[in-house]
Amino acid sequence: MSTPRKIRRSEPEGVAELLPRVLGEMGLESTSIAVRLLRVWRDALGPEISPHCACDGLRRGVIHAHVRDSAWMQHIQMQKPRILEALAERLGQPLDDLRLRIGPVDPDDPEPQP
């Protein structure tokens, strides 16, 4: 006769908290970091900058992002040390760089005119 399984009672976890941990356990740490980056992006940039800059991903410690136009690119370049520090603090690991390109910031934005 088999013993009954012990039922664990715990608080439910949201996918946003669960996914990074599962990816890390599967050996997909870089994917886990990218998921966490997307979660903290807007908060780290702040309410002034975040509507004008969209994270495009993380590759080899370098964050790639699109900015609305050249004026915002210049403004964000001046804020880069603060942004990288804020992101590294929230992610719990250092980041190498933030590279910006002019491009659509959200799916409804048209491509900028040259």
Image (tube, grey):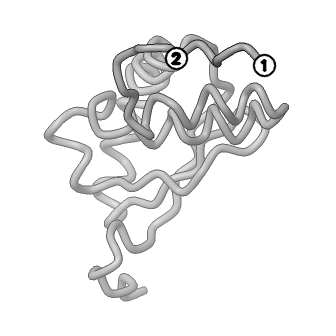
- As drawn, the residue found furthest toward the left would be 47
- As drawn, the residue found furthest toward the front would be 1
Residue at image coords 55%, 11%: 92
Mark 2 sits on what residue?
A: 7
Q: Which quadrant, please, contains the N terminus?
A: top right
Residue at image coords 32%, 70%: 106
Q: Which quadrant, please, contains the C terminus?
A: bottom left
The percent coordinates of residue 97 (x first, y second) are 63, 32
Mark number displayed over residue 90: none
Mark 1 sits on what residue?
A: 2
Q: Is residue 103 above or below residue 21?
A: below
Q: Secondary structure at mark 1?
A: loop
Q: Is residue 99 left or right of 76 when viewed as pictured?
A: right
The percent coordinates of residue 113 (x first, y second) are 36, 88
* Viewer-proximal residue among 73 and 60: 60
* Viewer-proximal residue among 26 and 93: 26
Q: Is residue 18 left or right of 68 when viewed as pictured?
A: right
The percent coordinates of residue 59 (x first, y second) are 73, 45
Mark 2 to mark 1 CA distance (whole Å) = 15 Å
Specify the amino acid type for callout 1.
Answer: Ser
Q: Secondary structure at mark 2?
A: loop
Specify the amino acid type for callout 2.
Answer: Ile
The percent coordinates of residue 107 (x first, y second) are 35, 77
